[in-house]
Image: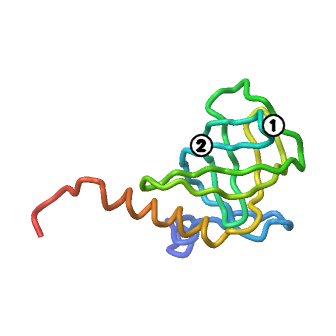
Amino acid sequence: MTNENDSQTSMRKKPQAINKNRQWQRQGYQVQMVFKCDEEIQIIGSTRDVSLSGVFFVPDHPNFERPIRGQQGVLELTMSGETHIFPCQVIRCSAEGIALNLHGKQAFFGMVLTHGIFKEVMDKPRSGGSS
């Protein structure tokens, strides 16, 4: 026999652990971006997850030129036909991708992503009956 409290507990979402140094929780979201640092390095890829303070950026090509920790750069995000530039810094770099912290414009970054997400939802064909 199943206890009602047990079934409710098992259906609850377990909270994600947040790193003590992390101010904002990461959210899984994929969007194409370009990461540029120095004059020679330009990496095309997409995000694996985002927060208001940074992104984990996954290059399209596995043999990307790896920036070094602390290196400054910019993320270029094009949504709705407009390109937005966000200054950032490399926090970590691995074979999986690059962890980047945004420097300034965090609220604007969140606004641009939110606008893009809503536009994607509104552009999808609706199924069902007429309204």
What residue is pinned by disc 1? 94
Question: What is the x, y in percent for residue 70?
Answer: 89, 50
Q: Residue at x 19, y 55 (%)?
A: 127
Q: Residue at x 67, y 58 (%)?
A: 86
Are the residues tagged 2 and 1 within 8 Å (C-beta)? no
Q: Residue at x 72, y 65 (%)?
A: 53
Residue lying farthest to the left in this orientation: 130
Q: Looking at the picture, which amino acid does disc 1 mark?
A: Ser
Q: Looking at the picture, which amino acid does disc 2 mark?
A: Ser
Q: Report the disc number at residue 23.
A: none
Given residues 17 and 68, the one toward you in this image is 68
Residue lying farthest to the front in this orientation: 39
Which type of secondary structure does the marked residue at label 1 adopt?
loop
Which type of secondary structure does the marked residue at label 2 adopt?
strand
Q: Quadrant of residue 118?
A: bottom left
Q: Quadrant of residue 110?
A: bottom right
Disc 1 residue crowd, few under 14, some 14–19, many 20+, Cα 10 Å: few
**Quadrant of the snapshot with the C terminus:** bottom left
In this rendering, the answer to whether 25 lies above or below 83 is: below
What residue is pinned by disc 2? 46
Could you give the CA–CA distance between mark 2 and mark 1, rounded to whole angstroms?
A: 15 Å
23 sits left or right of 122 in the view: right
